[in-house]
Image (spheres, grey):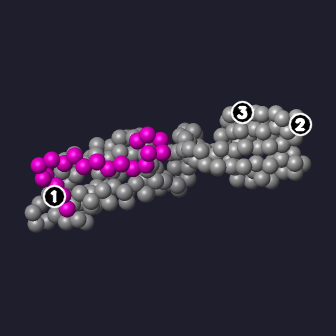
Amino acid sequence: YGHVWLKLEPGEPQSGFRFIDKVKGGVIPKEYIPAVEAGIKEALETGVLAGYPIVDIKATLYDGNYHEVDSSELAFKMAGSIALKNGAQKASPILLEPIMKLEVVMPAQFLGDVIGDLNARRGHVEGIETLGETCTVRSLVPLAETFGYATALRSLSQGRATYTMEFNCYRQLPANLAEHITARVRGR
């Protein structure tokens, strides 16, 4: 037996998970608080949207109750997990996708084709620098759109362009793609 009341709030981007214990007056014994946090962490791993993890969230434990005989760590771990999932479902969660910082260096003659390809990949060009006959394009591109990019770039530039890529941030996935992914996971 274990009941918990959580306040769930979105965290700042890249802030991860924060757990705050605001239980007063011993309504939940201190030895059960880590179990509640563990249950929440476990539920975060599988999330509520298509099985993807929940990120950047603050969970505040503010109330609950227990039974002298029937309460256990397992009961409070399950209570934390159930409370997180119930609250997250009511909060209109969104799917996030990883965004990569992509830098392409190429002869200037291929600039138009490379930018066209980046736009087709849902990329956003952040800047272009030209030095003589060489151009450098800095852009942000969803990771899902970068698969096969090396081959495409080689083809677009006759093998004369190079690129580097590194993780930048997470961003909300466009609604039409999120619906497609969640429907596919549900088996539609």
What is the quadrant of residue 93 in the picture? Answer: top left
> Which is more toward the observer, 70 or 16?
16
Q: Is mark 2 on a helix, strand or loop?
A: loop
Which mark, by number, is residue 119? none
Instruction: Say which residue appears at 23% left-offset and 57% top-offset.
Output: 33
Residue in view at x 27 percent, y 61 percent:
35
Give the class, few, some or many, for how many residues have Cα within 10 Å of label 2's Cα (few <14, many ≥20). Answer: few
Of callouts 1 and 3, which one flags the residue occurring earlier in the amino acid sequence? 1
The local secondary structure at tag 1 comes to loop
Residue 59 can be seen in this image: yes
Residue marked by disc 1: 29
Q: How far apart are marks 2 and 3 (CA)?
A: 17 Å
Give above or below for 28 relative to 90: below
Residue 133 tag number: 2
- Residue under pointer 3: 127
Q: Main secondary structure of the magenta part?
A: loop
- Residue 142 in the figure: left or right of residue 154: left
Q: Is residue 165 left or right of residue 135?
A: left
Extreme residue toward the front, this view: 131
Structural crowding at the residue carrying mark 3, measured as other residues with C-alpha within 10 Å and reported as few (<14), some (14–19) or many (≥20): few
Magenta span contains residue 186: no
Front residue of 151 and 161: 161
